[in-house]
Amino acid sequence: MSSTRKVSTYCYQCVNGPDMLTVEVTDGVATTVAPNFAAKGYHPADGKVCVKPYGLVQKIYNPNRILKPMKRTNPRKGRGEDPGFVEIEWEEALDTIAARLNAIRAESLVDEDGYPRVAFTTGGAATPYFYMGTFASFLAAWGPVDQSLGAGGTVKCYHTEHVYGELWHRAFTVCPDTPRCEYIVSFGNNIDASGGVTSVRRHADARARGIKRVQIEPHLSITGASASEWIPIRPKTDPAFLYAMLHVLLHERPLADLDRPFLKARTGSPYLVGPNGFFLRDPASRKPLIWDAGSQRAVPFDTPGADPALLGRYSLSGLEVGADGKEWMHGAVEATTAFEVTREMVAPHTPEWAAPITDVPAATIRRIANEFVEHARIGETIEFEGRTLPFRPVAVMLGKSVNNGWGAYECVWARTMLMVLVGGLEVPGGLLGSTVHISGMDFDRMGSVAPSPDGFLDYPFNPTDKEHWAAQPQVRHGHTTLIPIIGGGLTSQLMGSTVLTWMRLQGRAADSWGKPKPPDLWFVYRCNPNISFSETDKMGETMATFPFTVAFSYTQDETNHFADLVLPEAIDLESTQLIRLGGTHYFEQFWDSQGWVLRQPVVEPRGEARDFTWISTELAKRTGLLEAYNSMINMGAAGLPLKTDKYDFSLDVSKPHTVEETWDAVCRAASADVTDGAASDGLAWFKENGFRVKPFPKINWYLYPRMEDMGLRFELPYQERVLRIGQELAARLHEQGVTWWDRQLHEYEPLPTWKDLNKLWADAYERAYKIKASDYPFWLLTARSMQYAWGGNVSLQMIREVAANVAGHDGIMINAKVADEMGIAQGDRIEVTSPVGVTSGRALLRQGVRPDTVVMVGQFGHWKTPYAKDLDMPSLNNLVPMNMDLVDGTGSAVDAVLVKIKKIGSKR
């Protein structure tokens, strides 16, 4: 007689998890994935899931799974070399890794250049951390680990939004207050493909109540298809459109149309700028000065009762403090408000100026800017959680290709300035941050709010003064040395310039730093950088030089082709982990509860796949790190501390613990956390109930109330700290003889000046590759696929069947008229060539693609991954150059490239 049961678990295949779900198991076989309807009323999508979790059952039983440890027998590494993998036992695999780790520890944890000899790479916007059990505890116990060998970070993420968003309003990621917003201007933000099930639900509800979304992008995305209006902008000209919108607000509308109280009290707009570009300060208190319109004199910014002037130039005395403590004491000097300086900068950038750059009519740009202001409801308020708050139901959003590389600083600054001008930052209806990673703990955004002496939010910049600057890079991309804004915390390595790491390993960058040695041992988990990064052919050549690579893998792929050991992990529905959920974690994740959710095995692991916590514990035992490893778990490296002043569920550090013992302790701590110590239910309780939550204060969706209570201002429009830090960084680098970062230092501007990005790209290509840029007339862009993004689902037939319903998943999208002019018909084979690579695929003729643009859906280009390699789907990644001239001041680059096209075959 067959038996059927339902097991609760979670999906965190993309950053918008965890989504709770249930799996039906019949006679020990997983058969069906379904929403967890017990989450209704807690989860923003009421427990529903997107398409990716429905592939998890097929993932378990995929015949191409790696189910036993394998070792390489062919010492020669290369794409054309057969690795000669043979199956081995876990004992041999673990002993082999431990022997290498022990040899490293016996000699030195870092090499002669000071770089860690162990490296770890993962992908999926760090979502693998929510599947890797206690491996983070093992890495913490180990010591220095290089995480700068990226799999796509700082190239394919929202990098500039991450760093400047955290600086300005504690917003590693942002989204509109979707349930209250009425008008969204989106520059390529493809939220319906990238935002998970919660954003699909929230935006569908918003459309039903009449929200207007204007989608501005070179090709019609999934999100653009459901927008109120699509505006096909020329690639890489978004800053011009945004600056023209600012011009309309600052020069074509009266100041009375803007949110003057917000600008005066909650921003740095009234701060006075001196002749050297720094704030004029009161000599006694050293606080920035404002001009008090009431007393007609300069006073410190926080003077009670002052009426700050927003416009004008004033003669006064004051102190300027520049880089490295340099001071100028002015007896009588002209100073200008930061707001006035901003108006002057955008004055030339009219809609008429922007029209030929963007290929968008001036009248359209002007209309969008005016509609934005008119929908902002400036002056209106709303009662929320007992507070009277501004109500500003408008938002401006940016996509990932707008957020990375040169031009991203301009875009993020201009977007945030538009929100500031209407008072729509961090208030109901407006633009909200959702999580933090640099300035605090990701599930305690409000806990990161602290004042700086100038009245802005404090921020953990890496030091640039002579005494404290880190002249010696800690890892191969030198994040603490080169990029002050990303800080030096737990996640900062992931936001350094991963392009720089790979280029240095290839001997193609940073001459005065030299070519570093590769790591002695490289762990790779849930990522495939030989597909997901840039210039992937060169990536493979680089990986082939690594002495020893350990890949934890689900199937064979293009990266573990170069590995020495390939180990099978127990995957999503076969393993155990407890993680946080709720609060405001990532896009559209605005919950009114917070707590913990369990992933548990719904079936026994297939073959010899092992839970990652078991793997981590075995490695700790074999490397003499068991006590340190257990101590890290006790301290909270598995999610939360196991001992506080209210409870003690800490593990005995002297002995190994089973997977169940470890997570039982974490579950008990989580129960105490949610109930303020009243409960101590363990793993069995969470297996039965799935998740446990407590109320989350919805007022904490918005930063504005906390800023108001603390008398703090958003650090806009003028970036005085950026100017000072940039000058100090330039001095430090030049003192060390480092000049190859000078182009990036140009970005340290207090107000980001507009740059002709099309010319910048063309010039960089012509310098580096000795070509004529005009021979490459198309921009090749990529588009996100909700079905594939982040999930490692390219080997699943079911996902392929679903994705086939969405345009772009079977070839290269090209404008129909341009294709006709080139003699290209639907389904013809076309070749796409960049200065560094070539690929081919079937032509997909579309009206919703600009004539100067071609598009490839991301995640493809496989030559080793089973099933995926037979899909004949090209990727832009091998065509995108790694080029130092295209890395911006925050270390990021963008996955877009200039290409040429030709027909090479007719449809068969």
Image (cartoon, helix red, strand yellow):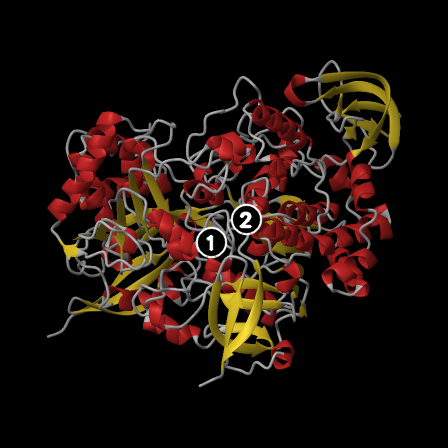
**Disc 2 secondary structure class:** loop
List the residue tagged with mark 2: 893
Q: Is residue 139 above or below residue 411?
A: above
Amino acid of disc 1: Ser
Residue 44 visible at all: no
Give the camera-side residue of 215 and 691: 215
**Quarter of the figure that contains the C terminus:** bottom left
Q: Are marks 2 and 1 in contact (CB under 8 Å)?
A: yes
Q: Residues within 10 Å of mark 2 (few under 14, many from 20)?
A: many
Residue 692 spot, x, y in % from top left? 35, 49
Q: Residue drawn 80% across and 19% down?
A: 318
What is the quadrant of residue 489 in the picture?
top left
Q: Residue drawn 58% across and 32% down?
A: 739
Q: Is residue 713 left or right of residue 369?
A: left
Q: Is residue 826 left or right of residue 382?
A: left
Q: Which mark is residue 591?
A: none
**Quarter of the figure that contains the N terminus:** bottom left
Q: In whole angstroms, how far apart are the C-alphas of marks 2 and 1? A: 10 Å
Give the camera-side residue of 453 and 332: 332
Residue 667 spot, x, y in % from top left? 28, 43
Q: Is residue 555 left or right of residue 792?
A: left
Q: Residue drawn 31% across and 70% down?
A: 867
What is the quadrant of residue 314 in the picture?
top right
Q: Which mark is residue 534?
A: 1
Q: Residues within 10 Å of mark 1 (few under 14, many from 20)?
A: many
